Amino acid sequence: MISTSDIFTISSQKQFEKIALKTFRFQYENNLVYREFCNHLKTDVHKVKSLKQIPFLPIQFFKSHSVVSNHDPVETTFTSSGTTGMITSKHLVTDVSIYEESYRNAFSEFYGNIEDYVVLALLPSYLEREGSSLIHMVENLINLSNHAESGFYLHNHDDLIQKLIKLNQDGQNVLLIGVTYALLDLIEKQRFQLQNIIIMETGGMKGKRKEMIREELHDILCDGFGVNAIHSEYGMTELLSQAYSLGDGIFECPSWMQILVRDTEDALTYVPTGKTGGINVIDLANINSCSFIATQDLGKKYPNNSFEVLGRFDNSDIRGCNLMVL
């Protein structure tokens, strides 16, 4: 069995690969859905000796199957957002403390001590539904910050504007994490000149506004908030870890998470560094579900293991996926 201390203390590529391969074998043995998928691909488990030989489960399986690797009771179920009538993803989490350990460690790795920040959250689309893993994380970070000023904002933009102006004048370090359309709404109401304040966008337009290319969006947000860079979080319902961008849309993973980029024409092969393809994620915090997920995101990876997200497949683009449906 792999312990969380194994996962969250990874310090080298060799160690990451060793634990990833151990996790693969564990999940093949204990996750019925993943085992059937691997068998469908005629995977010889004993011949899997490298990351690129591991089969990646298409993310759509979280919509149609219970993807779990143990028989423990489900502590919480994280669900994806979706329009009425849409089938949403469900991540059955049998040990929510692993998720909490993952985001706390990742925050510390990228941003330092959470107690140094006032955490403000502008996440209306997420607050208005049940089962958001992002709300679970941000609520916990707000509590861990130990600042009376930390908290959620829904549609009370005037209060948030006053709070940001005051905290900025006080020289307080602030993290404002917001769904993209709500951040745009805010700067249409008030333009800022902020120091010591990190603006982190997450979650796109949620059907509230026209989608924009990242460069244009970040230019507008930088201008409106008076900051030099916009940070971003790359996470999803099906993952218990997040990658972070400290600017320019270039993401880095915590030490227990990595991405590979697959060929869009052949889901079982990989493209060279710097070339665009489909993003496969290894998230070792997903020890109790599936750590090897083929997402519907398009991106490219750089030599230092950072990566960029360039968009999403539409359904007609998911080639080679007939073999991905059981």
Image (cartoon, helix red, strand yellow):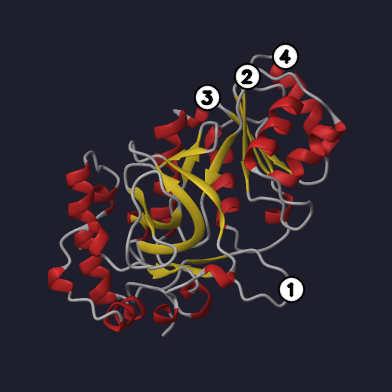
Residue tagged 4: 169
Could you say which disc has been placed on residue 172 in the image?
2
Residue tagged 3: 116
For mark 1, does the 10 Å Cα neighbourhood hold few (<14), some (14 to 19), or many (20 or more) residues? few
- Upstream in the sequence, badge 2 or badge 1? 1
Residue tagged 1: 84
Res. 140 visible in picture: no
Q: Residue 22, relative to residue 309: is it above or below?
A: below
The x, y position of residue 114, in whole percent, is 50, 31
Q: Amino acid at mark 4?
A: Gln
For the residues labelled 2 and 1, say whether their Cβ atoms are less than 8 Å apart: no
Q: Residue at x 51, y 51 (%)?
A: 235
Q: Is residue 155 left or right of residue 100?
A: right
- Depth order, front residue of 272/142: 272
Q: Secondary structure at mark 4?
A: helix
Rounded to the nearest whole Å, what is the CA distance between mark 3 and mark 1? 40 Å
Rounded to the nearest whole Å, what is the CA distance between mark 2 and mark 3? 9 Å
Rounded to the nearest whole Å, what is the CA distance between mark 2 and mark 4? 8 Å
Could you say which disc has been placed on residue 60 in the image?
none
Q: Amino acid at mark 1?
A: Thr
- Depth order, front residue of 46/142: 46
For the residues labelled 2 and 4, say whether their Cβ atoms are less than 8 Å apart: no
Quadrant position of residue 306: top left
For mark 4, does the 10 Å Cα neighbourhood hold few (<14), some (14 to 19), or many (20 or more) residues? few
Q: Residue at x 77, y 23 (%)?
A: 192
